[in-house]
C-alpha cells in the first residue's frame, strides 16, 4: 500500500506540472472547452485563431484561486507513466478547482486521488474496499493549485527543435541539472507538457517520465470529481 500511495503522490506531482503549464490568462485555447468528450487538442489547430475569451471565472476565484487556461477548466488527460523502470497508466479528470486521478492496473481502476484545491484537501480512495483517507494538500491550496513549473520551467531551458508527439506539434526543451537531464515536449498552444523525461546523467536511464496519450476537453461532471457517497472515511 505504501508503494501505491507513493505512486499516487508522484502522479499528483505530474498533475501539478500539467495544470501549472496551463495557468495563464487571455490565451486562445487549442480546443473549445465544454464540447463533447473525445475532442483532442492536438487535432484542433484550426480553432486556435478564434477570438475566444479565457473563459468565465469559476467559484474558486472568490477564494483567491487563479484561473486556469480554458482548455484545463474541464478536461480529461490520459497518461502512460514510467517510475523507476515500471510503467503505469493513469487518467486525470479536471473540473475547475476539483480534480481526480485514477491509477489503472490491467484496465481496472485500483486507486483514485480526489482533490478539492479551493478547500485545500483531498482523499485517497481504494476501489476494492471503498475506503477513503483524508489528505491535506501539501503547500496550501493556492500554491498547490497553480503549483510551480520547477524542473519544467521552460524559460530556464534551451529549445532543441520540434517534434510531433501523439498528434501534438511540440517544442522540445532541454536542461542539464547536473545529476539529471530534463527534456520536456511542450504543446505551445496551451502550454500542455505532452511528454516529460527526467534521466540520470550517469547512465541515461529514466528516473521518471510520462507521455500524454490523449487530451480531451469537456465531458467532466461534478459527480466524476467528487468522492463517492458510499465511500468509507478512515482516519
Image (tube, helix red, strand yellow):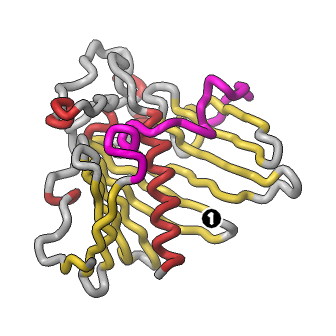
Q: Is residue 147 left or right of residue 161?
A: left
Q: Residue lying farthest left?
A: 229
- The quadrant of the image that shows the C terminus is bottom left
Which region of the structure is painted magenta? 138-163
In percent of width and height, residue 132 lies at: 27, 75
In percent of width and height, residue 138 lies at: 41, 52
State yes or no: residue 85 in magenta. no
- Picture quarter containing residue 150? top right
Q: Is residue 152 left or right of residue 2?
A: right
Residue that label 1 marks: 83
In percent of width and height, residue 233 lies at: 21, 76
Residue under the point 69% across and 50% down: 198
Q: Residue lying farthest right?
A: 202
In percent of width and height, residue 177 lies at: 77, 40
Residue under the point 63% across and 71% down: 86
Q: Secondary structure at mark 1?
A: strand
Q: Residue lying farthest bottom?
A: 129
Give 141 or 154, whichever is nearer the viewer.
Answer: 141
Q: Is residue 122 left or right of residue 144?
A: left
- Picture quarter containing residue 170? top right
Residue under the point 59% across and 68% down: 87
Amino acid at each position: 500500500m505504501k508503494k501505491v500511495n507513493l505512486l499516487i503522490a508522484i502522479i499528483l506531482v505530474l498533475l501539478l506540472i500539467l495544470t501549472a503549464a496551463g495557468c495563464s490568462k487571455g490565451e486562445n485555447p487549442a480546443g473549445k472547452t465544454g464540447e463533447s468528450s473525445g475532442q483532442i487538442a492536438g487535432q484542433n489547430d484550426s480553432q486556435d485563431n478564434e477570438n475566444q475569451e479565457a473563459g468565465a471565472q469559476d467559484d474558486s476565484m472568490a477564494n483567491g484561486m487563479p484561473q486556469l487556461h480554458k482548455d484545463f477548466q474541464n478536461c480529461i488527460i490520459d497518461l502512460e507513466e514510467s517510475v523507476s523502470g515500471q510503467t503505469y497508466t493513469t487518467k486525470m479528470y479536471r473540473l475547475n478547482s476539483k480534480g481526480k486521478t485514477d491509477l489503472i492496473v490491467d484496465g481496472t481502476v485500483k486507486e483514485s486521488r480526489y482533490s478539492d484545491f479551493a478547500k485545500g484537501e483531498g482523499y485517497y480512495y481504494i476501489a476494492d474496499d471503498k475506503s477513503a483517507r483524508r489528505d491535506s494538500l501539501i503547500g496550501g491550496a493556492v500554491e498547490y493549485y497553480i503549483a510551480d513549473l520547477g524542473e519544467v520551467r521552460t524559460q530556464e531551458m534551451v529549445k532543441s527543435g520540434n517534434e510531433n508527439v501523439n498528434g501534438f506539434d511540440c517544442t522540445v526543451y532541454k536542461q542539464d541539472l547536473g545529476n539529471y537531464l530534463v527534456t520536456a515536449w511542450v504543446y505551445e498552444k496551451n502550454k500542455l507538457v505532452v511528454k516529460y523525461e527526467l534521466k540520470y546523467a550517469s547512465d541515461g536511464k529514466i528516473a521518471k517520465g510520462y507521455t500524454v496519450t490523449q487530451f480531451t476537453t469537456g465531458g467532466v461532471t461534478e459527480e466524476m470529481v467528487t468522492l463517492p457517497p458510499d465511500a468509507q472515511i478512515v482516519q
